Amino acid sequence: MNSQTKRIFAYVFILALGAWRIIFSAPQSADESVAAPQAGFLAPNFILQTTEGKTYALADLRGQAVLVNIWATWCPPCKAEMPAIQKVYEEYAQRGLVVLAVNSAFQDDPAQIAPFREKYQLTFPILLDDAALVSRAYQARSLPSSYFIDRRGVISEVVVGGPMSEALLRARVEEILKP
C-alpha cells in the first residue's frame, strides 16, 4: 500500500469514526433527550382507559393541575398514601386539580382494583397501564411514583416512593395550582 492510499484510508476511518460518534451520541427521539421525566420538562403524554372504559389523554388536561400517581394494589406505601391523595383531591378538585391514578396493571391483578377503590373510597379516575406504556415513558422504577404537573403540562416535582404525607401533597398541589 502506498502512502497516498494509507492517507485516504486514514481520512475515511476518521470520518467514519466521527459520524459514528455523532449518530450514537445524539438523542434518537425527543423523548430520549431527557434521561427520565423530571422537574422543568414537559410531562410525556399518554392515553389510557379507566376501569370503566373512559379514555384520558394527559395532553387534554392542559390548563389543569395534574397529579399522576403510578401504583399497584399490592404495594404497602401505595395503600398508605391513597387516603391522603383522596382527601387532597376532594379539597382541591374545584380549583382545578386532577388526580390520575395509573395502576400498574401489567404487574397487578386488575380484579383487585374495584375492592381497593371501594375500601379507600377513591373517587378520582383509575387508569389501567396494562401494557406498561406509562410506566416505561415515566421510567417508574419504584411504586408508588408521583408526578406533579402544572397547568402548562410541565413537571413541577417527582416523588419516587412513599407514602406521601398529606402535608407534602398539599404543598406540591398548591405549587402546581398557581396560574
Image: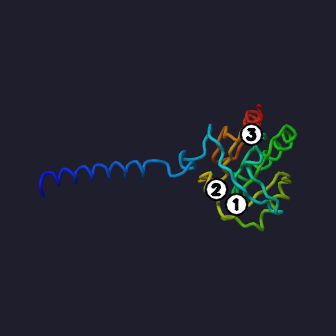
The mark found on residue 135 in the picture is: 2
The answer to whether residue 17 is left or right of residue 151 is left
Mark 3 vs 1, N-terminal side:
1
Snapshot quadrant of residue 136: bottom right
Tell me how far mark 3 sits from mark 1, CA to CA: 23 Å
The residue that appears at 73% across and 41% down in the rendered structure is: 165
Query: Which quarter of the figure is the C terminus placed in?
Result: top right
Q: Position of residue 11 (x, y in %)?
A: 25, 49
Name which residue type carries label 3: Leu
Name which residue type carries label 1: Asp
Query: Which quarter of the figure is the N terminus placed in?
Result: bottom left
Q: Is residue 72 above or below residue 109?
A: above
The answer to whether residue 74 is left or right of residue 3 is right
Mark 3 residue element: helix
The mark found on residue 129 in the picture is: 1
Residue 114 visible in the current orientation: no
Q: Residues within 10 Å of mark 3 (few under 14, many from 20)?
A: some
The residue that appears at 74% across and 45% down in the rendered structure is: 67
Q: Residues within 10 Å of mark 1 (few under 14, many from 20)?
A: many
